[in-house]
Image: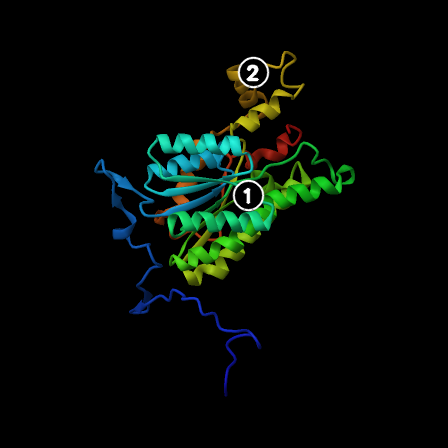
């Protein structure tokens, strides 16, 4: 009796798939690029670079976590393409990375527009010849993300487009490049809010969706040697974060700035840990490298434990 192995009318993919080999009932081979001998490459200083030979595509690279991640990537031997809608910030980031000796290209693009994302992916692949890592870091919440009965449809659509549609578009057009390269890593960004469901409903829905989307990516593309994981940051001391809370009237009547503001944010707004972009960038590098080859389909909570106690402080934001 014939057993049907795929859905009726579904064509067999012509793309080359990685297939494991087995020895004594155990998986013997690993996905392309994951052998320990290939994983660790000597740098010029005699040390070890974890991303040597890899090319990374990062959205939101003009500032914050993505910019710091791009700098860490080039330190680890990777070439990077950074994408941002803010051309001035993107060009500045490009100059800083080049000054540090990195091989980088900046691409100005609105990542909520499919044509712009496709063009950015094509430009990065044309410049470097391949892509190995996709980092979907662009995103953010809006102050107008109010309780559901008060929220405008425009705010809902804008939040979903930036935080959920954009990673889909990057993956749609970037995954074929990873397949052609023999595998790779996708790093998406969820949030502590996506894990808890508290605060802004549109942002929570988008970031919760990222976690499920990441699991689906992991399941669908493991056969090509592609891993997909997400990071759920808590409060991170980015420029945008600090500017937003300068306007919080209840923080301090004199509206402090600089170090004074940071102390109040850390002590009064968030009794637990407030991280820096470098804290998250180190996790991005880990997930992009073959050191994390046993991780796929997971979301790492990088919030200093805040999500464990968030309900107690539900009124803080």
**Farthest top residue in view:** 254
Front residue (pair 199, 276):
276
Q: In screen coordinates, is 206 left or right of 68?
A: right
Front residue (pair 309, 291):
291
Q: Is residue 218 above or below residue 271?
A: below
Q: Position of residue 209 (x, y in %)?
A: 60, 49
Tell me which corner region of the image, top left, top right, bottom left or bottom right, holds residue 159: top right
Tell me which corner region of the image, top left, top right, bottom left or bottom right, holds residue 7: bottom right
CA separation in Å, label 1 and label 2: 29 Å
Task: Tell me the crowding category of disc 2: few under 14, some 14 to 19, or many 20 or more residues within 10 angstroms, Cα based.
Answer: some
Q: Is residue 311 above or below residue 212?
A: above
Which residue is rendered at x = 47% and y = 60% of the image? 221
Mark identifier at residue 257: 2
**Count of picture labels:** 2
Q: Please say if the residues under marks 1 and 2 sit with CB atoms less than 8 Å apart.
A: no
* Mark nearer the viewer, 1 or 2: 2
**Farthest right residue in view:** 149
Q: Secondary structure at mark 1?
A: loop
Q: Secondary structure at mark 2?
A: loop
**Farthest left residue in view:** 46
Tell me which corner region of the image, top left, top right, bottom left or bottom right, holds residue 81: top left
| Residue 304 visible within the image | no
Task: Tell me the crowding category of disc 1: few under 14, some 14 to 19, or many 20 or more residues within 10 angstroms, Cα based.
Answer: many
Of labels 1 and 2, earlier in sequence is: 1
Front residue (pair 317, 163):
163
Which residue is rendered at x = 38% and y = 48% of the image? 128
Q: Position of residue 310 (x, y in %)?
A: 60, 34
The residue that mark 1 highlights is 190
């Amino acid at each position: 009796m014939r057993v049907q192995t795929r859905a009726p009318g579904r064509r067999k993919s012509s793309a080359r798939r990685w297939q494991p080999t087995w020895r004594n009932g155990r998986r013997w081979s690993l996905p392309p690029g994951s052998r320990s001998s290939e994983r660790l490459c000597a740098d010029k200083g005699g040390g070890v670079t974890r991303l040597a030979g890899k090319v990374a595509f990062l959205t939101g690279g003009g500032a914050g976590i993505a910019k710091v991640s791009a700098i860490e990537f080039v330190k680890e031997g990777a070439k990077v393409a950074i994408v941002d809608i803010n051309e001035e910030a993107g060009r500045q980031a490009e100059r800083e990375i080049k000054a540090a000796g990195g091989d980088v290209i900046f691409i100005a693009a609105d990542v909520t527009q499919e044509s712009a994302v496709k063009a950015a992916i094509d430009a990065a692949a044309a410049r470097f010849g391949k892509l190995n890592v996709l980092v979907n870091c662009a995103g953010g919440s809006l102050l107008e993300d109010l309780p559901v009965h008060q929220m405008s449809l425009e705010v809902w659509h804008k939040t979903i487009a930036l935080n959920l549609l954009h990673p889909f578009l990057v993956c749609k057009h970037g995954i074929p490049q990873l397949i052609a390269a023999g595998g790779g890593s996708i790093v998406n960004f969820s949030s502590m809010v996506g894990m808890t469901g508290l605060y802004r409903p549109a942002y929570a829905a988008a970031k919760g969706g990222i976690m499920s989307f990441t699991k689906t990516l992991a399941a669908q593309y493991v056969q090509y040697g592609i891993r997909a994981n997400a990071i759920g940051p808590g409060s991170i001391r980015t420029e945008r974060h600090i500017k937003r809370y300068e306007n919080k009237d209840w923080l301090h009547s004199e509206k402090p700035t600089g170090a004074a503001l940071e102390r109040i944010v850390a002590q009064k707004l968030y009794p637990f840990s407030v991280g820096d972009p470098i804290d998250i960038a180190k996790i991005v590098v880990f997930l992009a490298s073959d050191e994390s080859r046993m991780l796929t389909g997971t979301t790492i909570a990088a919030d200093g434990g805040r999500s464990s106690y968030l309900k107690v402080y539900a009124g803080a934001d």
